[in-house]
Amino acid sequence: MTTEEKIFNAARIIFQKKGFAGARMQEIADQAGINKAMLHYCFKNKELLFQAVFMNAFSQLAPQINEIFNSKASVFDKIRKFTNSYISFVILNPYLPQFVIQEMNNNPEFVMSFLRNENRPNPTVLIAQIEKEIADSIINPINPKQLLINIIAMTVFPFAAQMMVKGMLQISDTEFTAMMEERKTSIAEQIINSIKR
């Protein structure tokens, strides 16, 4: 394992436990089994490290999402595959939605640079397919972009507001994860039932 891989693995563990604000570079160095000077040599500060971890994680997710968007599957199957893939990914990287929201407010240039990246999730093919399935009377008339927002909102929100959800529902971390596993299928079926003819 390279030093960078050790740092990424350690950073994921610490960011997941402590969040971005609570994580300390010394803790990450200790977790990686390197000294703090080496960590700072590779990444000058915590924000740069988090951004690198974020981009590394999304470089794994984006191809999965684009494969779903661009596949020959029906819109309904794509919805099922998207909710399953996204929730599976975020269960393994639960700090990412909160970080994205934080960065949108504190560092919008970083978020925009990610959204301009040619490897970002690109729903163009899916949007055209939704329009065709509406024309073919498979799906009820709906603005395809509104449909995508609904799918994203229903999958992202519980993770972005995880502390609020756990507190309001009085559930443990284990119960939360179980609920998110259940949402892999329940979200897809709710959305499909609301749009199918």
Image (spheres, grey):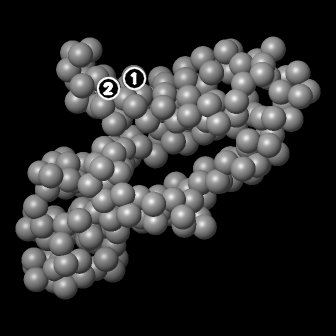
Q: Is 167 placed left or right of 2 in the picture?
A: left
Q: Is 140 placed left or right of 189 in the picture?
A: right
The amino acid beneath tag 2 is Phe
Q: Can you give x and y, in whole percent of width and height, for residue 163 in the image?
A: 23, 30
Q: Residue at x 61, y 50 (%)?
A: 65
Q: Can you give x and y, in whole percent of width and height, for residue 132 in the image?
A: 86, 35
Tags 2 and 1 in contact by the CB under 8 Å rule? Answer: yes
> From the image, which quarter does the N terminus lie in?
bottom left
**Quick check: 7 above or below 141?**
below
Q: Residue at x 70, y 30 (%)?
A: 143
What is the C-alpha distance between the residues marked 2 and 1?
5 Å
Q: Is residue 44 visible?
A: yes
Q: Which mark is residue 69?
A: none
**Quick check: 123 above or below 116?**
above
- Decide: few, some or many residues near mark 2? Use Cα within 10 Å; few <14, some 14-19, many ≥20: some
Q: Residue at x 41, y 43 (%)?
A: 90
On the image, numbered disc 2 is attached to which residue?
176
Task: Check disc 1 and report its element: helix, strand or loop.
Answer: helix
Q: Residue at x 10, y 83 (%)?
A: 37
Q: Can you give x and y, in whole percent of width and height, for residue 126 in the image?
A: 73, 43
Quadrant of the image occupied by residue 135: top right
**Quick check: 122 above or below 82?**
below
The amino acid beneath tag 1 is Met
Task: Check disc 2 and report its element: helix, strand or loop.
Answer: helix
Q: Is 140 placed left or right of 153 in the picture?
A: right
- In this view, the residue in front, 169 or 6, is 169
On the image, numbered disc 1 is attached to which residue?
179
Quadrant of the image occupied by residue 169: top left
> From the image, which quarter does the C terminus lie in?
top right
Q: Is residue 57 visible?
A: no
- Decide: few, some or many residues near mark 1? Use Cα within 10 Å; few <14, some 14-19, many ≥20: some
Q: Can you give x and y, in whole percent of width and height, for residue 30 in the image?
A: 11, 68
